[in-house]
Image (cartoon, helix red, strand yellow):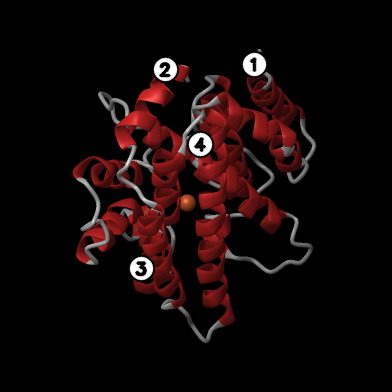
Amino acid sequence: MIKENINSINKMIKGTVTEKLLQKCLDWLSDFVFSYSDPDPAIQENYDIKRIHTYKVREEIKFLGKELGLKNDALRLAEIIGLFHDLGRFEQYARYKTFKDNLSEDHAALGVKIINDAGLLASFQELPASIIRNAILFHNRLSIPEGEKDPYLFYEKLIRDADKLDIWRVVLKYYYRGNDKINKEIEWTSTQSTAISKKVLEDIHNKRSVLTKHVQNLNDFKLLQMAWVFDLNFEISMEEVKKRKYLEKMRDTLAQSAEIDKVYNILISHSIGD
Ligand SMILES: [Fe+2]
């Protein structure tokens, strides 16, 4: 990211996202996330996961934003995007008891609807308000739609990286949980298999994100998550992946096989910039 671009984003957003506005968002969010609860511990666990994820993504996006040079209002705007990016997850889970958008509805669009219905952006100026809406709307797409431009594009990229950095934490915590308790919303698929689907391998060999429709079993799903390294927007995000040893830890949850070694090497080489 060129320094001049960041400076111009700082300038554009200057004066539009006050500390008070951020505090108002935090206050609203706290009531919102705690309004979702369930006596069933398995259901409650998923609300908890999303609540913790929400606040962690705020931290991740603040960290990335700062490292990239965002300041004051422009940095607070990033924090608000982090805080609001998964609002739709709570309502999606309440209504459908699933996090699968294809079996329920697009949680990003649902999040924007919640924002609009609650009038959350009423005291925002037009530019930061539409940046928030776009960044949320596109955060879960396979890729950002063509034609997006800064300052929108910058925030759209930023939330996608921040989100991934924390999802890796969530899934690793689950893969290393040390018991057999299955959370089918994290595992995505209940199909246990030692195989890896051909199409998943193909995606990785072609250095592209794995399509969810190619995922047939848990191994595939793990590889889909590892292949997110092809979809990181900023070097600093990749630096964090390396520092936290996300790829190594994910690989250790997979079986030993030449096939897996091969794709793992592709992913690791990509992460070190080969
Ligand atoms: Fe998220």
Residue 93 in sight here: no
Residue 70 coordinates in the image, percent (x, y)? 47, 34
At label 2, which amino acid type do we have? Glu
Q: Would you say the beta carbon of the disc 1 residue lies within 8 angstroms of ligand 1?
A: no
Q: Amino acid at mark 3?
A: Glu
Q: In the image, what residue type sits under mark 4? A: Gly
Identify the mark nearer the N-term, 3 or 4: 4
Classify mark 4 as within 8 Å of ligand 1 or not, answering yes or no: no
Q: Residue furthest front?
A: 15
Residue at 70% across, 35% down: 247
The residue identified by callout 2 is 4
Q: Amino acid at mark 1?
A: Gly
Label 1: how many residues lie within 10 Å, few (<14), some (14-19) or many (20+)?
A: few
Q: Secondary structure at mark 2?
A: helix
Q: Residues within 10 Å of mark 2 (few under 14, many from 20)?
A: few
* Among numbered discs 2 and 4, the one appearing first in the sequence: 2
Marks 3 and 1: CB-CB under 8 Å? no
Check the image and report above or below for 240 versus 114: above
Q: Could you tell whether 70 is left or right of 126 in the image?
A: right
Q: Which mark is residue 65?
A: 4
Residue at the disc numbered 1: 273
Q: Is residue 211 above or below residue 117?
A: above
Taking depth in this image into account, of 195 and 63 the one nearest to the observer is: 63
CA gap, disc 2 and disc 3: 39 Å
Q: Which residue is mark 3?
A: 91
Disc number for residue 35: none
Q: Give me the C-alpha separation between circle 1 and circle 4.
A: 22 Å
Q: CA distance from mark 2 to mark 4?
A: 15 Å
- Identify the mark nearer the N-term, 3 or 1: 3
User: Rounded to the nearest whole Å, what is the CA distance between mark 3 and mark 4?
Assistant: 28 Å
Q: Note whether ligand 1 is within 8 Å of mark 2.
A: no
